């Protein structure tokens, strides 16, 4: 997925899978949370379709006060949220509090965790419907998933079912969106903007009382692929990637133009995180970090 630099710049701050923050290389290895910030970014999954055990599927949480807003729900999303709650003491990521989510696009690596997000929090006590925002096709995906799990839903809500006392917790209000403001509450205003990818796709800008995050502005969160890794892939994938993904050189160009205080790389393909770090260091002099699951910024 690729963000248009001019669009990124003019729209203040937002990208699909790249986070830009100000940090030295040393700081890049040791994420530090701004002392007075109410808004936190939690990387729940920095992975790609490849099932690397230490990198869960794409998912990022923007946490404001006691509320969490998810961007994408790749495989492992609920367990990573549970880990952030347990190990990082981020109360908003206790799984029953997962109630609002935004999806950048409907590729499977970004959505395989959708039934997990619908059903797992319900089974442990979420009582309200999930609110989900994303491109066209989201409503049909939602309806099909609920139908796929019909036997489970009927069993859990029948007179003997464990979830009969709160039968609304598995329901989903799916909102198909276009560019513009798509969500607003006391914590956050969320603005969607179109991005270039293999299908209809959006980036989201979060404006909170203390930060502006394009998943950019202050902080840019973005995907990347190194040429060394791409060279190991089949020619057909290299052609696909040239059209719909971002090479490190392109990301460096984008970041030089957008000038974020901090760039956070997620959804990256490289020979290793170290290879990505050295590749980016040769191309980009600004502050950036290679994101790892459960990093908090
Ligand atoms: Zn992806
Ligand atoms: Zn994709």
Image: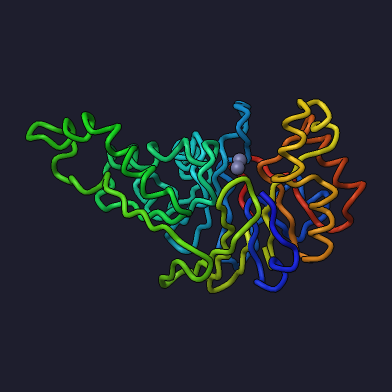
Who is closer to the viewer here, 293 or 101?
A: 101
Q: From the viewer's perspective, is 63 left or right of 114?
A: right
Look at the image and tell me whether residue 2 can be seen: yes
Residue 231 coordinates in the image, percent (x, y): 84, 29
Q: Residue at x 72, y 58 (%)?
A: 20
Q: Is residue 11 above or below residue 151?
A: below
Q: Residue at x 53, y 70 (%)?
A: 208
**How is the protein colored in the picture?**
rainbow
Quarter of the image for the C terminus: give it: bottom right
Look at the image and tell me whether residue 38 can be seen: no
Among the 4 quarters of the image, the one containing residue 161: top left
Q: Is residue 18 above or below residue 260?
A: above
Who is closer to the viewer here, 62 or 170?
A: 170
Who is closer to the viewer here, 73 or 104?
A: 104
Among the 4 quarters of the image, the one containing residue 118: top left
Q: How many marks?
A: 0
Q: From the viewer's perspective, is 139 left or right of 194?
A: left
Outermost residue toward the left?
159
Image quadrant, ligand 2: top right
Q: From the viewer's perspective, is 38 left or right of 35?
A: left
Residue 82 coordinates in the image, percent (x, y): 45, 40
């Amino acid at each position: 997925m690729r963000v248009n630099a001019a669009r990124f710049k003019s729209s203040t701050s937002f990208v699909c899978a790249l986070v830009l923050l100000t940090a030295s290389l040393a700081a890049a290895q040791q994420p530090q949370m701004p002392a007075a910030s109410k808004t936190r970014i939690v990387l729940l999954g920095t992975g790609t379709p490849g099932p690397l055990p230490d990198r869960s599927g794409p998912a990022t949480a923007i946490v404001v006060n006691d509320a969490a807003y998810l961007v994408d729900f790749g495989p492992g999303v609920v367990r990573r949220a549970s880990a952030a709650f347990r190990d990082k003491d981020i109360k908003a990521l206790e799984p029953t509090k997962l109630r609002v989510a935004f999806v950048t696009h409907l590729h499977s690596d970004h959505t395989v965790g959708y039934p997990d997000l619908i059903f797992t929090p319900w089974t442990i006590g979420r009582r309200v419907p999930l609110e989900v925002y994303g491109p066209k096709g989201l409503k049909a995906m939602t309806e099909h998933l609920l139908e796929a799990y019909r036997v489970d839903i009927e069993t859990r809500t029948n007179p003997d079912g464990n979830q009969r006392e709160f039968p609304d917790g598995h329901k989903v209000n799916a909102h198909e969106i276009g560019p513009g403001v798509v969500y607003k509450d006391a914590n956050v205003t969320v603005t969607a903007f179109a991005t270039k990818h293999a299908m209809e796709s959006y980036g989201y800008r979060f404006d909170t009382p203390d930060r502006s995050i394009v998943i950019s502005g202050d902080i840019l969160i973005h995907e990347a692929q190194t040429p060394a890794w791409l060279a190991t892939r089949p020619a057909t994938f290299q052609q696909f990637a040239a059209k719909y993904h971002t090479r490190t050189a392109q990301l460096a160009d984008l970041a030089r133009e957008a000038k974020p205080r901090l760039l956070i790389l997620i959804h990256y393909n490289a020979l290793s995180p170290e290879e990505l770090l050295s590749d980016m260091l040769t191309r980009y002099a600004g502050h950036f970090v290679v994101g790892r699951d459960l990093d908090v910024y």
